[in-house]
Amino acid sequence: MTTVFDVLASHGIVGDDATTMLRAVFTAMMDDRFESKRDALGLGPFYGDFRDLAVQLSHARLEVGSTVYQQCVTDLFGSDGVRFAMLAPQIAEVAR
Protein backbone atom coordinates (compact mmCIF):
# COMPACT_ATOMS: atom_id res chain seq x y z
CA MET A 1 0.00 0.00 0.00
CA THR A 2 1.39 3.37 -1.04
CA THR A 3 1.33 6.03 1.65
CA VAL A 4 1.59 9.80 1.70
CA PHE A 5 5.20 9.40 2.82
CA ASP A 6 5.94 7.15 -0.18
CA VAL A 7 4.70 9.87 -2.53
CA LEU A 8 6.77 12.50 -0.75
CA ALA A 9 9.86 10.28 -0.78
CA SER A 10 9.47 9.66 -4.51
CA HIS A 11 9.83 13.44 -4.93
CA GLY A 12 12.88 13.65 -2.66
CA ILE A 13 10.97 14.97 0.35
CA VAL A 14 12.16 12.86 3.29
CA GLY A 15 13.14 13.10 6.95
CA ASP A 16 13.15 16.57 8.50
CA ASP A 17 12.13 18.10 5.17
CA ALA A 18 8.93 16.01 5.09
CA THR A 19 8.24 16.71 8.76
CA THR A 20 8.64 20.47 8.29
CA MET A 21 6.38 20.45 5.26
CA LEU A 22 3.61 18.46 6.97
CA ARG A 23 3.90 20.61 10.09
CA ALA A 24 3.36 23.76 7.96
CA VAL A 25 0.28 22.20 6.38
CA PHE A 26 -1.09 21.02 9.72
CA THR A 27 -0.52 24.42 11.34
CA ALA A 28 -2.23 26.30 8.50
CA MET A 29 -5.22 23.96 8.59
CA MET A 30 -5.67 24.29 12.35
CA ASP A 31 -5.05 28.04 12.71
CA ASP A 32 -8.26 30.11 12.72
CA ARG A 33 -6.38 33.06 11.22
CA PHE A 34 -6.30 31.17 7.91
CA GLU A 35 -10.01 30.34 7.82
CA SER A 36 -10.78 32.77 4.98
CA LYS A 37 -7.99 31.27 2.87
CA ARG A 38 -9.30 27.75 3.50
CA ASP A 39 -12.80 28.95 2.61
CA ALA A 40 -11.54 30.49 -0.65
CA LEU A 41 -10.41 27.02 -1.67
CA GLY A 42 -13.58 25.36 -0.40
CA LEU A 43 -11.67 23.20 2.08
CA GLY A 44 -13.71 21.41 4.70
CA PRO A 45 -12.74 20.51 8.26
CA PHE A 46 -9.29 19.00 8.76
CA TYR A 47 -8.97 16.06 11.12
CA GLY A 48 -5.32 15.26 10.47
CA ASP A 49 -5.96 13.08 7.42
CA PHE A 50 -3.45 14.32 4.84
CA ARG A 51 -4.85 12.07 2.09
CA ASP A 52 -8.32 13.54 2.56
CA LEU A 53 -6.83 17.04 2.45
CA ALA A 54 -5.00 16.13 -0.78
CA VAL A 55 -8.31 15.02 -2.32
CA GLN A 56 -9.92 18.32 -1.28
CA LEU A 57 -6.99 20.29 -2.69
CA SER A 58 -7.16 18.37 -5.97
CA HIS A 59 -10.84 19.29 -6.29
CA ALA A 60 -10.09 22.91 -5.36
CA ARG A 61 -7.45 23.16 -8.09
CA LEU A 62 -10.03 22.09 -10.67
CA GLU A 63 -12.63 24.50 -9.31
CA VAL A 64 -10.59 27.70 -9.01
CA GLY A 65 -8.00 27.15 -11.76
CA SER A 66 -4.24 26.82 -11.54
CA THR A 67 -3.33 30.50 -11.13
CA VAL A 68 -5.77 31.19 -8.30
CA TYR A 69 -4.93 27.85 -6.71
CA GLN A 70 -1.20 28.58 -6.72
CA GLN A 71 -1.74 31.97 -5.05
CA CYS A 72 -4.18 30.63 -2.46
CA VAL A 73 -2.04 27.67 -1.40
CA THR A 74 1.08 29.85 -1.25
CA ASP A 75 -0.75 32.29 1.01
CA LEU A 76 -2.21 29.48 3.10
CA PHE A 77 0.72 27.10 3.50
CA GLY A 78 3.77 29.25 2.88
CA SER A 79 6.90 28.01 1.15
CA ASP A 80 7.20 24.89 3.31
CA GLY A 81 3.68 23.61 2.79
CA VAL A 82 3.05 24.69 -0.78
CA ARG A 83 4.91 21.62 -2.05
CA PHE A 84 2.26 19.44 -0.41
CA ALA A 85 -0.45 21.33 -2.29
CA MET A 86 1.41 20.94 -5.57
CA LEU A 87 1.72 17.18 -4.99
CA ALA A 88 -1.94 16.88 -3.93
CA PRO A 89 -3.07 15.05 -7.09
CA GLN A 90 -0.45 12.30 -6.60
CA ILE A 91 -1.17 12.09 -2.87
CA ALA A 92 -4.91 11.94 -3.56
CA GLU A 93 -4.32 8.89 -5.75
CA VAL A 94 -3.11 6.88 -2.73
CA ALA A 95 -6.48 7.57 -1.10
CA ARG A 96 -8.22 5.35 -3.62
Image: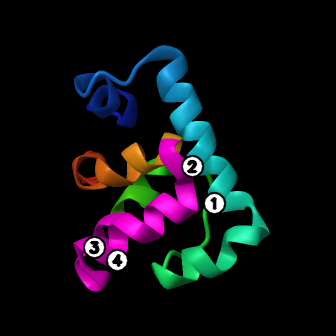
The vertical placement of 64 against 7, above or below, is: below
Please say if the residues under marks 2 and 3 sit with CB atoms less than 8 Å apart: no
Q: Which residue is mark 3?
A: 67
Q: Nearer the viewer, mark 3 or mark 1?
A: 3
Q: Which residue is mark 1?
A: 29
Q: Earlier in the sequence, mark 2 or mark 3?
A: 2
In this view, the residue in front, 6 or 86, is 86
Q: CA distance from mark 4 to mark 3?
A: 4 Å
Q: CA distance from mark 2 to mark 4?
A: 18 Å
Q: Earlier in the sequence, mark 2 or mark 4?
A: 2
Answer few, some or many: residues within 10 Å of disc 2's Cα (few below 14, many 20 plus, some between 14 and 19).
Answer: many
Q: Nearer the viewer, mark 2 or mark 4?
A: 4
Q: Which residue is mark 2?
A: 25
- Mark yes or no: residue 74 visible: yes
Q: Is residue 82 magenta?
A: no
The vertical placement of 18 against 64, above or below, is: above
Q: Nearer the viewer, mark 2 or mark 3?
A: 3
- Asked whether, in this view, residue 53 is left or right of residue 1, the answer is right
